Amino acid sequence: MKFNILATLTLVASLFFTGSAVAENPDQVQQLILTGECPGCDLKGADLSGAHLLGADLRNANLQGAILIEANLEGADLTGANLNGANLTQAFVTNASLNCANLNQVNLTAAKLYDTDVSGAVMNNLTLTNAEIFETGIGVGGSAEEFNFNVECRVES
């Protein structure tokens, strides 16, 4: 009987803990939090909710599916970063670079984006409900003549 209980507890515990270990690289998350620098890091699925990432260097980082709810990305460099499917609900993104980033399926619900460079970024299926976007090349409708679609995306590490 004790063996059955122990086996069940072990199975349940492994199901709970493998998700977070697979979803993120804890050493690289810690590096980002402590230093604000993590270019090229694999932060796929990382929970960075509420993180203060002012001026963070996240060039070419993999933030696919990352949770950045209420994160402060003021002045952050996300040039060439992969944010496919990331959740930036209520995030504060100002004076940041998302140049040549993958922003497909990013949730920007109630996010604030001011003076952010999105030139060359791929942006399909964004969620922009109640987002505040100023001085940033994201628009609904309007004329394509306003934008330069000939941006060359060469990202250096």
Image (tube, helix red, strand yellow):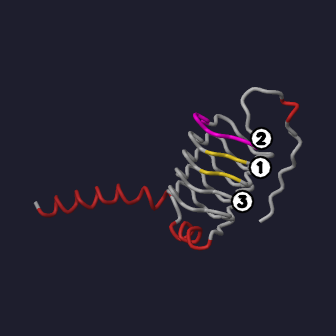
**Residue at the location (10% across, 60% down)?**
1
Name the amino acid type tagged 3: Asp
Residue topped by disc 1: 117
As for residue 130 lying within the magenta part, the answer is yes
Check contact, mark 2 vs mark 1: CB within 8 A: yes
User: What's the CA distance linking mark 2 and mark 3?
Assistant: 16 Å
- Sequence order check, earlier mark of 2 and 1: 1
Q: Is residue 139 left or right of residue 145?
A: left
- Sequence order check, earlier mark of 1 and 3: 3
User: What's the CA distance linking mark 2 and mark 1?
Assistant: 7 Å
Secondary structure mostly seen in the magenta stretch: loop
Q: Is residue 15 left or right of residue 113?
A: left
Name the amino acid type tagged 1: Asp
Question: Does residue 87 show up?
Answer: no
| Residue 77, label in figure | 3
Please identify the quarter of the rendering in which residue 127 is found: top right
**Front-lying residue, 139 or 44:** 139
Residues drawn in magenta: 127-135
User: What's the CA distance linking mark 1 and mark 3?
Assistant: 10 Å
Pointer 3: residues within 10 angstroms few (<14), some, or many (20+)? many
Say which element carries label 1: loop
**Which quadrant of the figure contains the C terminus?**
bottom right
Name the amino acid type tagged 2: Gly
Tell me where residue 22 appears, x and y as whole percent.
48, 59
